[in-house]
């Protein structure tokens, strides 16, 4: 589904991504772990060009999205994104937050979008919040609504950028539960997270990033049960 090759990104003299390459197959659940400043979020945001790599190539479903002739907005319709801080519009109700993109982009008409949004809200137990505004919601509720906002676009892959790091600990579980449900349903997911239990349970493959490189990758059993590098062992000792 996604192939990236020789991705490099610098901020001044700081090399954030240092020539990384790899592939992500349809249906995979990729979890990216590693220390702060290792390049995790920059890599994720490069995959849909929210950050533009200085060099390298990204191919999504056969289309080179780093080619300037590519309509990146059309590509992004198939690449959902869930941010750390929800990014809900405070002046819009929950239902309007969810239906805005598909109606503006004419993917669904207003009636279809509202029907689909209510169906998704019911699925996550938040139908009663349809007409509420973000200020009245808990962090966990906001993040689950942000996930629904991605789902209504019927994406082929969802990118999660530390979706639980801004939440109170007691709210983390409700968001991870929804993400686990999506994973079980076959959604292709790429997730930057510090939730090691989630990584162990859900990931089909884990990428350990450090110093702008994919320093090690493998199954959860490989990464947690048989880490090869001293750097990964050091990291796991610090976080587990």
Image (cartoon, rainbow, N blue to C red):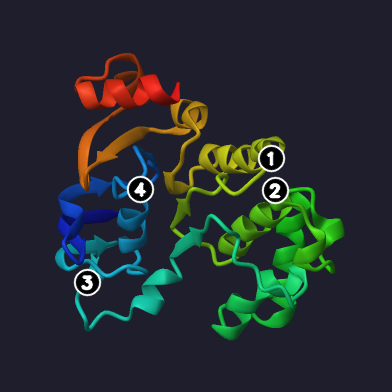
Q: Distance between the residues labelled 1 and 4?
A: 26 Å
Q: Nearer the viewer, residue 198 or 107?
A: 198
Label 4 crowd bin: few (<14), some (14–19), many (20+), radius 10 Å: some
User: Which residue is drawn at the image coordinates 40% and 78% (left, top)?
Assistant: 73
**Labels 2 & 1 near each other (Cβ < 8 A):** yes
- Seen as rendered, the residue at the extreme top is 225
**Residue on which disc 2 sits:** 140
| Relative to 160, residue 234 above or below | above
Earlier-in-chain disc, 3 versus 2: 3
Q: Residue at x 43, y 46 (%)?
A: 191
Query: Disc 1 designates what residue?
Result: 174
Disc 4 + disc 2, Cβ < 8 Å: no
Contact between labelled residues 2 and 3, with CB atoms less than 8 Å apart: no
Q: In the figure, is residue 211 to the left or right of 124?
A: left
Marks 3 and 1, the one that precedes in the sequence: 3
Question: Mark 3 against mark 2, which lies toward the viewer?
Answer: 2
Q: Dot 3: few (<14), some (14–19), or many (≥20) neighbours within 10 Å?
A: many
**Circle 3 sits on which residue?**
66
Element marked by disc 2: helix
Q: Where is residue 194 in the image (x, y as percent from the top left)?
A: 47, 37
Q: Earlier in the sequence, mark 4 or mark 3?
A: 4
Q: Element under label 3? A: loop
Q: Residue 55 in the image: state x and y as whole percent.
A: 14, 66
């Amino acid at each position: 589904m996604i192939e990236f090759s020789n991705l490099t990104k610098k901020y001044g003299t700081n090399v954030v991504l240092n020539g990384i390459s790899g592939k992500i197959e349809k249906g995979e659940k990729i979890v990216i772990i590693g220390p702060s400043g290792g390049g995790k979020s920059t890599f994720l945001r490069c995959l849909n060009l929210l950050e533009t790599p200085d060099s390298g190539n990204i191919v999504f479903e056969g289309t080179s999205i780093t080619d300037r002739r590519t309509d990146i907005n059309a590509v992004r319709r198939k690449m959902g994104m869930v941010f750390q801080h929800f990014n809900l519009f405070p002046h819009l109700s929950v239902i309007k937050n969810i239906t805005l993109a598909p109606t503006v982009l004419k993917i669904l008409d207003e009636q279809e979008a509202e029907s689909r949004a209510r169906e998704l809200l019911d699925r996550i137990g938040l139908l009663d919040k349809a007409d509420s505004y973000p200020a009245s919601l808990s962090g966990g509720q906001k993040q689950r609504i942000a996930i629904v906002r991605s789902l209504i676009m019927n994406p082929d892959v969802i990118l999660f950028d530390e979706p639980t790091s801004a939440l109170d600990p007691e709210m983390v579980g409700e968001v991870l539960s929804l993400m686990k449900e999506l994973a079980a349903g076959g959604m292709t997911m790429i997730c930057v997270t510090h939730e090691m239990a989630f990584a162990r349970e859900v990931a089909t493959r884990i990428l350990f990033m450090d110093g702008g490189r994919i320093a090690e990758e493998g199954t959860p059993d490989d990464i947690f049960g048989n880490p090869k590098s001293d750097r990964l062992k050091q990291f796991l000792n610090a976080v587990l």
